[in-house]
Image (cartoon, rainbow, N blue to C red):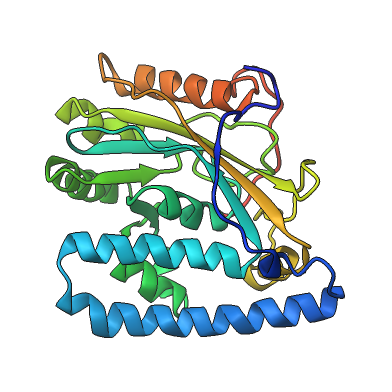
Amino acid sequence: MPRDGLRGVHVTPYNAWVSLAPFPVSLRRALRIGLLMLHLAWGVALAGLLFPLLDPAQRDRRIMAWARHLLRVLGVRLQADAAPSLPGGALLVCNHVSWLDIYLIYAAQRVHFVSKAEVRGWPVAGWLAHKTGTLFIERGRRADTARINAEMRALMQSGAWVAVFPEGTTSDGRGLRRFMPSLLQPAVELNCPIVPAALRYRSLDGEYTAAPAYIDNLSMWQSLKQIVSEPGLIAELHFGAPILPNGHRRDLAAQAEAATARLLGVEPAGTAPQTPAGPPA
């Protein structure tokens, strides 16, 4: 695959009003933030009032629909191909650029994310993450990995997909960091498929953009303002062929990293220059 990678993706419907490209930046930003507040309020009502009345399949459909609408509100056009069809659970591994990554993946495939414990305390967003089934790990406590691995095993055994960002932090999207193997252990123990995925962001004219990158001590508010100030963004998400565990988790992490690098059209972390670190996933 050529270095600009991620070809053959399916373009999702994209309403022109969402890009707001003709509007001045200040007006574009104000309109999108206003729409975002309304959409967050709808998410709180949905999770707090409607979710208890729905079965898991109905909740999953609404979570995916809510994520798709969030992308439209923010002016993000998603280009994604279909996730592999698997008979049971799977572990999704993906490169990590932005907090937006979560909603891109939600829009394409229902998963349960593993996230740093600090996210649970974020106003509104942390509560919504909890309601959508996110697993929270205390990264400073090695013993907490065993608890998270047990929860991941239970979900995958039930047929669910779990998603992790094995780089452990965000980048500017132009390279790939080494995949850490610890959270791949449940897939090894269950002989569960690992699905590599790759995402990147472009401007509306198809060029690389760092606007969504959540790096360099950027605050959540600053990151949001960068995104909503853009005329629009194109987000590309591509899934690779499932990898069946056949060895130690370190070998599996290397295989998954190489597969993701191929999807992105970049060199694996062992040979590619490293990009600036950002907040942990």
Rendering quarter of residue 223: bottom right
Image height of 208 relative to 216, above or below: above
* Image position, residue 238 (x, y; %): 51, 34
Q: Say if 37 sits above or below 253 in the image.
A: below
- Residue appearing at x 22%, y 35% in the figure: 186
At x 68%, y 31%, the residue is: 274
The residue positioned farthest toward the top in the image shown: 246
Q: Nearer the viewer, residue 9 or 146?
A: 9
Residue 152 in the image, given as x and y percentages of width and height = 22, 46
The answer to whether residue 14 shows anywhere in this view is yes
In the rendered image, residue 75, in percent from the top left (x then y), is placed at: 66, 64
Q: Is residue 143 above or below residue 245?
A: below
Where residue 244 sits, quadrant-wise, is top left
Tell which of 2 and 98 is nearer to you: 2
Quarter of the image with the N terminus is: top right
245 lies left or right of 173: left
Is residue 180 visible to the viewer in this orientation of the structure?
no
- Residue situated in front as seen by the camera: 191 or 33: 33
Residue 272 x, y percent position in the rendering:
68, 22
